[in-house]
Amino acid sequence: MYSHLLAKKTDNPKEPSFEQTIQGHTHLVLEAIEVINSVICNDVLKLMSEDITLEHWEKATLCSAWLHDMGKANDHFQKMLRRPDFRQGIRHDTFGLVVITDLLEGWLEDFWKNYPPWFKAAVLFAVGGHHLKFPDRKERRHTEVIFLGGHPYFFEFLQIGQKKFDLASPPEMFNRTYSLLSLDGIKRSLSRLQHLLDLEFSPSQKLFIAALKSTLMAADVAGSALPASGRDVKSWLKKRLQSVLNTNELETVVQKKTRGQVLHPFQQQVKDANEQTLLLEAGCGSGKTAAAYLWAATKAQGKRLFFCYPTTTTASEGFSGYFQDPDFEAILIHSRAAVDYRLLENMPSPSKAELELHSLKLEALDTWPIPAVVCTAHTVLGILQNERRGIFAWPSLIRSVFVFDEIHSFSPKLFQHLLRFLEIFHSIPVLLMSATIPRERKEALEQSCRKRGELKVITGPEVREKADRYILKRAGENDAWDSVLEVLKNKEKVLWVCNTVARCMNVSKKGWELGLPVQPFHSRYRYADRLIRQQTVINGFMPNKPSMLAVTTQVAEMSLDLSADLLITEYAPVPALIQRLGRLNRYQDEPPEVRLALFIKPEDALPYEKKENEVEYWGKIEEWLSRVANGTPQSQKNLLIAFWEVEKMVSQSLIEEDIFCDWIDDPWSSLTGRHALMEAGYTVEIVREEDIEKGHPSELVIPMPFPKDRSWVRWQHRGHYLIAPEGTINYDPFWGGEYAQGKSNYSII
């Protein structure tokens, strides 16, 4: 029927290259998995129980690599590669499972007998799940498919396994037709197989299966992408995967940033800590990040580093602040990192490895040759929900140490994923950092870290934490404006934080009408303009710059490294208020004078709480303010003590029930996108039709509230961005975007 059994598309199906055939691609994936194993196997086994051995791991990875694409030996897949308009009736990963258990079970029986029952299940689950699309639920039209076992090249494929695992001579194979009807053939075989493999897997066996799937996917993408780019699989992987950090390199990064200043005692404590899990509680501006890199300088010796931030903005700021010119390769990874590289003035140039990957179109492997990664927490924790970026980063993740910053700001669901990560990756060193970690979260961390050993807690510098820094007062908006005028008259800086974009824009425009040097900054800008707005505010707060009134939303809580002379903020959850206060009188350990912070109660609790829950919400904030807004100078320590006291008075838990992680909790299934890492949001990413030709959509996207007018569901898309018809959104690079009057019935929050 076909002269060759293809694994990949080719311009000439009658004379394909070796790597484009099933047997050729299999050889390359086996090469890739052997190299990957030589690097990661010891780290993988540290996560497993003692009854799982190196032989289990090596044989399982090799066997899954051998069998993973066997299902491509069918007439549908072969026709699809030769005819782009043809749609197959069954996926090759699903079909491979059926053929292995239906036609090769007797031949492989002696091999399976060498290992416990869960071993065979692990291999088969990896074969079925190596594209994250099993079980395949898509409706397909065909009624039958032909297995091409009689093809002469299929015998060559079987011989690969015979030599690798010292098997008996392969059985004689023939072509065979399988029914695709719902009550017959394939579906019945899969149902029977699922029943046979429905074992009681231990936690360690589930982890073995998850790790096996990820390793196979990594080897498969290497065996596919590298030959297509003209690179030798073995030599490329050996060189890139062996890139690691050393102590001197990371210590040099800190020395450049701190200009050789003497370490704070707490920074030395962090650096010297031997515990597997460390929690650093320190106020804003105390030097936590420098301490984190000092910790990594010890823990990441001969390993890799993932420094994880809660948002894309904080990740970009953290990357540009520490990696201007390091002595090693470093990369920024998040959804808009490419835009940041192009547009942010203080960003370092992409590394040589990053440029190579981009030129070869191998961005999926971006963490493999680069030992230091700055990213959002979702990049790492996404592996728990089978997100592809996390899966493809697996060979790097398993050999890394991790820093998670600002963990108090994680949503409940994201924080729950962090807890599972700590439980699963119990042998990997982790540093957690926060200025205001709630009691419930600290208790949950202690419980999750039992397998990891003690959760060591280190607090920030005593002098800085206890220094009088603020005077807090409740205020009305008119009183706030009087204070703004007075501070600006003294050529100083004011930060005004609103909870919603609507109020941010209203306050900004009032300041503009008063002739004040106002600079608005919120989320509702085109991404390229948002970067400009952010840098304008940060640069404007530098010493010796003219007075400024920066009016922002919650984006100021973590992403802005600035120090105001007056802070005005709307009521918000107490941890958020303490973060906002971290932008007031920030830079000196012992400031010569205290600075004023005014707290305004807004008309509603959006976006933090619904109307029916406002009484309890306002009550917590008022109780905290009664302790700290009393006319006496306050320190960061005082703010935290008052927060802990209020917490003891309430019973609401910040921790949800255990979340389901697709990566490890369901060995049979390998699907992505079933469970979101984050709660559903209130905004949708929109590009205006007027802007569509002005650049890449990632630079032009504006986060906007979902319109209540349901006509938006019929708008066009550009990738995953929604295109708003012309005239729908009014936009100004200074003020931001808002729906045109009468175009959408909604409330801006």
Image: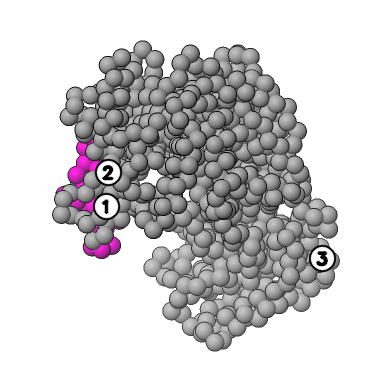
Which residue, given by chain and number where applicable, does mark 3 sit on?
A: 115
Q: Nearer the viewer, residue 418 or 20?
A: 418
The residue that appears at 69% across and 46% down in the rendered structure is 446
**Residue 424 relative to residue 567: left or right:** right
36 vs 585: above or below: below
Which amino acid type is shown beneath numbered disc 3? Tyr
Q: Which residue is mark 2?
A: 502
Disc number lying in front (1 or 3)? 1
Quarter of the image where one finds residue 207: bottom right
Task: Answer whether labels 3 and 2 touch (C-beta < 8 Å).
Answer: no
Q: Which residue is mark 1?
A: 747
Q: Position of residue 398 (x, y in %)?
A: 67, 45
What segment is highlighted magenta in the picture? 710-737
628 to the left or right of 70 = left
* Residue 538 screen position, x and y as percent: 38, 25
Q: Is residue 331 above or below residue 32?
A: above
Percent coordinates x, y for residue 673 in the rendering: 49, 60
Q: Residues within 10 Å of mark 2 (few under 14, many from 20)?
A: some
Residue 141: give x, y in percent of width and height. 43, 79
Question: Is residue 476 highlighted in magenta?
Answer: no
At x 54%, y 63%, the residue is 671
Residue at screen point 68% across, 67% down: 124
Q: Residue at x 74, y 48 (%)?
A: 450
- Kindly state the secondary structure of the residue where label 3 is placed: loop
Residue 324 seen anywhere in this rendered image of the structure: no
Cβ atoms at labels 2 and 1 below 8 Å apart: yes
